[in-house]
């Protein structure tokens, strides 16, 4: 099952829990006129992490956003035309609908983040 989760996350280009939580929030709540700070408060992440997550999922084409007006934007999930993205998102949402599935998803994302940090630190460093 972990291999499927990992592949689904790769298909969606999701590597951090905040990115997943932003997508799940927008899926559950539809189109929203909010700020990154408001989303952060609602999903329990800090504003910086949510801002970066919104930037990543927007640039990946998973979320559409309007221009900023008085600090808020209109956010909504972008319709996924790629069948593999649709399938991956649906499977991950089904998995995350249970407590045990959410824990498994969180652990997988934490392992991916830890692996990326280790790879980043193990590179050649010049003093």
Image: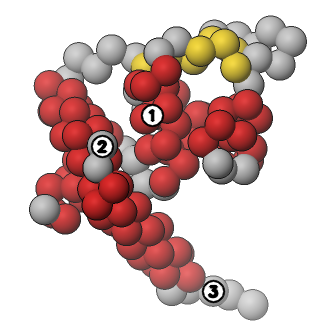
Mark closer to the chain start, 1 or 3:
1
State the SS at label 3: loop
Sequence order check: which comes first, mark 1 or mark 2? 1
Q: In this view, does 45 lie to the left or right of 47?
A: left
- Residue closest to the far front: 99
Residue placed under numbered mark 2 in the picture: 97
Task: Say if mark 2 contacts mark 3, CB within 8 Å.
Answer: no
Q: Position of residue 13 (x, y in %)?
A: 36, 44
Q: Residue at left 68%, top 87%? A: 126
| Residue at disc 1, secondary structure | helix
Tell me the tag on residue 125: 3
The residues bearing labels 2 and 3 have C-alpha atoms spaced at a distance of: 43 Å
Dot 3 alpha-carbon crowd within 10 angstroms: few under 14, some 14 to 19, many 20 or more = few
Quadrant of image for the C terminus = bottom right
At x 48%, y 54%, the residue is: 17
- Residue under the image location 51 percent in, 86 percent down: 122
Q: Mark 1 points at which residue?
A: 23
């Amino acid at each position: 099952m972990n291999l499927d989760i990992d592949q689904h996350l790769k298909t969606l280009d999701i590597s951090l829990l905040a990115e997943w939580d932003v997508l799940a929030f927008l899926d559950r709540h539809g189109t929203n006129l909010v700020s990154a700070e408001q989303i952060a408060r609602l999903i329990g992440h800090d504003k910086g992490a949510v801002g970066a997550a919104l930037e990543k999922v927007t640039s990946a084409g998973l979320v559409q956003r309007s221009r900023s007006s008085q600090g808020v934007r209109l956010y909504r999930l972008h319709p996924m035309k790629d069948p593999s993205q649709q399938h991956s998102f649906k499977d991950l949402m089904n998995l995350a609908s249970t407590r045990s599935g959410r824990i498994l998803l969180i652990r997988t994302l934490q392992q991916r983040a830890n692996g990326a940090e280790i790879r980043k630190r193990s590179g050649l460093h010049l003093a």
